[in-house]
Amino acid sequence: MRNRFLRLPPGFLVLLLLSLGLAAQNLRASASTASAPPGCAPWCPRNSVCVSATACRCHPGFSSWSGEIITSPADSCADINECGPPLAVSCGKFADCQNVDGSHYCTCSPGYGLVSGATTFRNESENTCQDVDECQQKPRICKGRSVCINTLGSYTCTCPPGLELNPKDPNLCTDVNECASGHNPCHSSTHCLNIVGGYKCHCYPGWKPVPGSPEGPDSTICADVDECSSGRHPCHSSTICVNTVGSYRCHCHPGWTPLPGLRDNQNTTVCEEVSFPIWTPPPGIQSQHLSHFFERIRDLRRRFQSASAQDTFKGLIHAVDHLLETPGDLETLPRSEQHCVAANLLFGLEDVLRGLSQALSNGSLTFNSPAGTELTLEVLEQGDRSISLSQNRAKMLLNWETVQGSADSGPSVVGLVSTPGMGKLLAEAPLVLDPERQEVVWETHKDLLQEVTHVLLSDVITAFLSNRDTQNLSSPVTFIFNHSVTPRPRKKVLCVFWEHSGNGSGHWATTGCTMVGTRDTSTTCRCTHLSSFAVLMVHYNLQEEDPVLDVITHVGLSLSLLCLLLAALTFLLCRAIQNTSTSLHLQLSLCLFLAHLLFLTAIDRTEIQMLCAVIAGALHYLYLASFTWMLLEGLHLFLTARKLTVVNYSSVSRFMKKLMFPVGYGVPAVIVAVSAASRPRLYGTSTRCWLNTDKGFIWAFLGPVCTIFSINLAFFLMTFWIVKNKLSSLNSDVSTLKNTRMLTFKATAQLFILGCTWCLGILQVGPAARVMAYLFTIINSLQGVFIFLVHCLLSQQVQQQYRKWFKGVTKTKAESEKYTLSSRAVSDASKHSAEN
């Protein structure tokens, strides 16, 4: 099918269209020429008529630039705008002129119309335009509740009161919500109810209009309805109607409590009289004293009356206090049975006190027994404040949300009981630590920890609320315990609670309780649940330290401190030996002196955690500085041996003077600063003020030490090789080699003193650990002695200086004695002459 049609190029189509247009124009010209009467001009323009062979005339409504008659073929006839200025036609009032091609017409202005209903007319004489009333049109032009107002040539839509024009549709009125406009017109005792086109003021439920006040208009004023006095309430006979603003509530009589499943202060509350909770003795326990105690409990239960609840509280506390003060045959029971009795007493006392507290009215109750058992109760209606219960040796802090919980809005009870005598029955009770705390304890004391024992540091207290759901409190409760024992090193304070087990016993646990802080005589704990609490002092039984090693350490370090002090004074005062090497010896002696002094006096100061951390950081820095100065000594020895000149060779001295102080004190400072910034809590342990081994933190010290030891060993080997080669040549530099050989001997001794001792400390593992420990302790504690021996006593220049000092002291003493003898002789001669 497609092959039946001829496909033409696009350019050819354009040329074809242009040819067709020119042909059409020629046809029209031929037609006009053919239609023109004989003797007329064939060139008359459009909108014109032929007059003669040389002239044409424009049609009415058209004109040319040369006038009405056209004599030039170049002229044309254009439309005359009769409506434009100058105004040629007048349409009259309320009308508008509309120009068209070769003519015009008139129309009425918007909002006006001809009387005849026509839409156009020719001139002012035909004008009958008058106003059109749009408000009478159908459908209505103003929508909904809007009111149409006709105006001359237009209209306006207005809204009645309570309505307003819709911004999106000016012909539509919408309702105004007076109640939500921010200008509530109703009285504060009423609530505003919006209606279409207005509003009403109604009384709240439980309110009614005051006498003489209508209900509905904005002048309505309401007052509370007292349902209780009017008898219009459904409260049960076991409750008391309590009127509230706008309502009422049914409150239990004093000494009564809501039935199970119901809540107090509700319109449907039904109450029963408070009863003494049942307290059963622990099964399988044979004890006469315990039987007597439960007989007193049953007697209190039989005689209980809600009106005398306070007397029952006192009798109950007296009974518990008497049992704990004189346990009698309870002390002969096995520890496991004693723990069962204690758990029964703690749980039963808490349950009975919570039940009996419902019979109390609002207020506080405090009772102290002769043996120290103390009860503090507070009954609160409602509040938004912090609550504090204080006793002689304990204090509890909590807020109202914790007390109220999800319970009803009635009175809430918060209580605290201290039972000092409970510690006898809980002796040797098991302690279960959190997995995290257990891991920390064993990690801190691994290889040394043999056993963890604990003792009660405070009284056992029991905290309870009327709200029984206390296992996950909305906010933690703070306890402050007072105690007379101050924790010492290797002892840690823990905040614990008694966790009941299925067999009627239990154990101390730490889950949910954290220690906020502890001082000499008080400890602050924070827990997220309630139970029976106490503060335990945990003692870490470590392997006993070897007393021989302890004596060696103290004697050796004391002797080293004396020798380091003498060496430092020698390096400062002996001018004959002062050079770069002496400066290195001096700085090393000072660092070791301060490190040993701090180690000897403060390594066990673990009482204050912050102070212990500072001591550990200082020891870290001083020992690192000592090893850094040792590295500088090794470098100085290598450079001196390489140059084969005297010790104070000028270029070596200048290089070392510029390098030694920034490196000797700056590098250790950077290492300690980075370590302290990254893990500050790992400075100090519970037994020593030194670096903690947790998370490999000890390598902040061992890493630099091993690196320095390795570098110094390389320096020593290279120095030894240089000296060996030069000794074999035996040239004229014998004096230089002799000095270098002495320096090599000193460096070897220094390397042995400082490097090997710490290497022995790292090797304290396996069967040879004890031998390595003795070698480490002996050599390390005598570092100062070896430094004084090698660099002072074995130096010829120092020996000569010592002789000069000794001779000077001896000469001064002899002159002083001679002066004293001469003075005595003169004095005796004077006395003899006076007697004569």
Image (cartoon, rainbow, N blue to C red):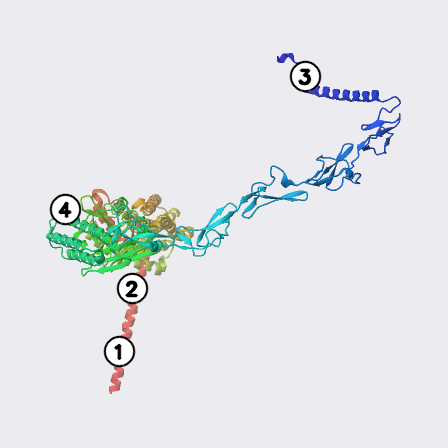
Q: Which quarter of the rendered picture does the C terminus lie within? A: bottom left
Mark 4–mark 1 Cα distance, whole angstroms, equals 100 Å
**Residue type highlighted by circle 2:** Phe
Dot 1 surroundings within 10 Å: few (below 14), some, or many (20 or more)? few
Mark 3–mark 1 Cα distance, whole angstroms, equals 154 Å
Mark 1–mark 2 Cα distance, whole angstroms, equals 27 Å
State which tag comes first along the sequence, 3 or 2. 3
Mark 1 lies on residue: 824
| Camera sees residue 458 | no
88 and 481: which one is in front?
Answer: 88
Mark 4–mark 3 Cα distance, whole angstroms, equals 116 Å
Mark 2 lies on residue: 806
Mark 4 lies on residue: 283
State which tag comes first along the sequence, 1 or 2. 2
**Residue 8, label in figure:** 3
491 and 274: which one is in front?
Answer: 274
